[in-house]
Image (cartoon, rainbow, N blue to C red):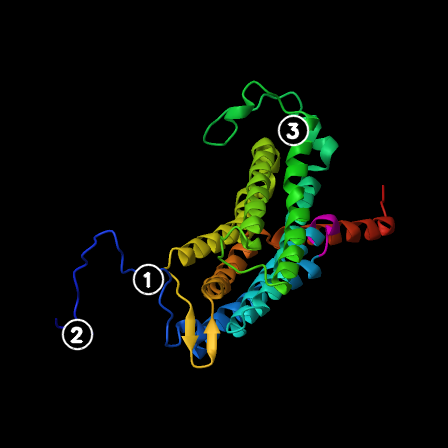
Amino acid sequence: MVAPEPGSSTTLANPGVSWLPDTPTPLEEPIFLMTTAAQGVSGFFVWTALLITCQQIYMHLQCYSVPNEQRHIVRILFIVPIYAFDSWLSLLFFTNDQYYIYFNTVRDCYEAFVIYNFLSLCYEYLGGESAIMSEIRGKSIESSCMYGTCCLWGKTYSIGFLRFCKQATLQFCVVKPLMAIITVVLQAFGKYKDGDFNVASGYLYVMIIYNISVSLSLYALFLFYFATRDLLSPYSPVLKFFMVKSVIFLSFWQGMLLAILEKCGAIPKISVADVSVGEGTVAAGYQNFIVCIEMFFAAIALRYAFTSKVYRDKRVDAQGNSQLEVSAPHLVFTF
C-alpha cells in the first residue's frame, strides 16, 4: 500500500466524515491591522476628524448665545473625538488582548451620556414636556407597519406615551455603563472574550442584554421623532436623528456582524513569532479600524447637523438689539 503524497488529495471512504477544520487556521504572517500603514491611515482620519470637530466646538463656544441648547450640542459633538481617539488607541495596542476592553469602557459610558443629551436637546427645542403635550395631546397615532406603529392603532398621544418614549430611551443610559463595568469585571476573571457565544462565557449574555436595550432605545427614540416631527421641523431634525442613531446604534450592530463573521470562521486568529491574537480581538481590531475612518465622515456630517451658524446669527441680532437700546436714550426729538 502506497501512502499518499503530502500535496495529493484523497477520497474519503465515509462521506459523513469531514476533513474541514473545526477552527479557522491561524495566520502565520502579519495582517494589515498590525502594520504601520494601518496605524498611519487610521491616524490620518482620526486626527482630521479631531481637527474638524474641535473647530466646530470652538465656533459654538465663540457664539454661545443659547446656552440651554448649545451645552447639549457641544457634549454630543465630543462623541467624535472620544470614539475616534479611543478606537485609534485600541488599534495601537492591537496585539494586547485586554487593553481595548478598557478603552471601550470609556466609549460605552460616553455613548449613554450622548443619548441623554440628545433627548434633552430635543426637549429644549420644544420647550419641555408640558409644551410638547399641549401640542400633541389627544391626536390619533398614525398606524403604519413601515413606521412600527401598527400596534398603536386606535390610540392617541398622551402623557403616558411621551413618558414611555423618554424612559425607554434613557434606560440605555443606565444599561450601557452598567454592562461596560460588568464586562471589565468579567474580563478580569477570565469570563469574557469577544465573539465567544459559548453559554459559559459572559459575552453571550452581555450581547443579549445590549441587543434588547439598544433595540428598545432605538424604537422609543423613533416613536418620539414620529410624534414630534412637525414640531421639530424648524430645527432640521432628520440629519440630527440619523447621525446620532448611526454613530451609536449602527456601530454596535457593525461590531455584532464582525463577531458573527468571526464565529463563522471568516476571521482567523493570528500566531506570528511571539505574538498570538485571538479571533475576537482581530474582529474588534477591524471594528476599531473601520470606526477610525467612519468618524472622519461623521465629523463632516455633524458639522451640518449641528451647525453653529444659527447661533452666530442670533448673537448678531442680540448685539444689534442691545446697541439700539443703548442709543435710544440719547435720541433728541424736535417738533
Residue 177 visible to the viewer? yes
Looking at the figure, which quarter contains the C terminus? top right
- Image location of residue 334, percent across then percent down: 85, 44
Dot 2 falls on a residue whose secondary structure is loop
- Image location of residue 177, percent across then percent down: 67, 53
- Image location of residue 105, percent across then percent down: 63, 60
Can you tell which of label 2 and label 3 is closer to the viewer? Answer: 2
| Residue for point 27% across, 60% down | 19
The answer to whether 92 is drawn above or below residue 203 in the figure is below
Question: Number of labelled discs?
Answer: 3
Nearer-N-terminus badge (2/3): 2
Mark 2 → mark 3, Cα distance in angstroms: 72 Å
Tell me the residue that label 3 is attached to: 161
Nearer-N-terminus badge (2/1): 2
Residue 54 visible to the viewer? no
Which mark identifies residue 206?
none
Question: Which span is picked out in magenta?
Answer: 64-70
Residue at the outermost left position? 1
- Image location of residue 182, percent across then percent down: 65, 55
Tell me the residue that label 2 is attached to: 5
Nearer-N-terminus badge (3/1): 1
Is residue 4 or residue 142 the one in the foreground? 4
Looking at the image, residue 231 sits to the left or right of residue 329; the answer is: left
Tell me the residue that label 1 is attached to: 21
Kind of residue at disc 2: Glu
Q: Is residue 132 magenta?
A: no
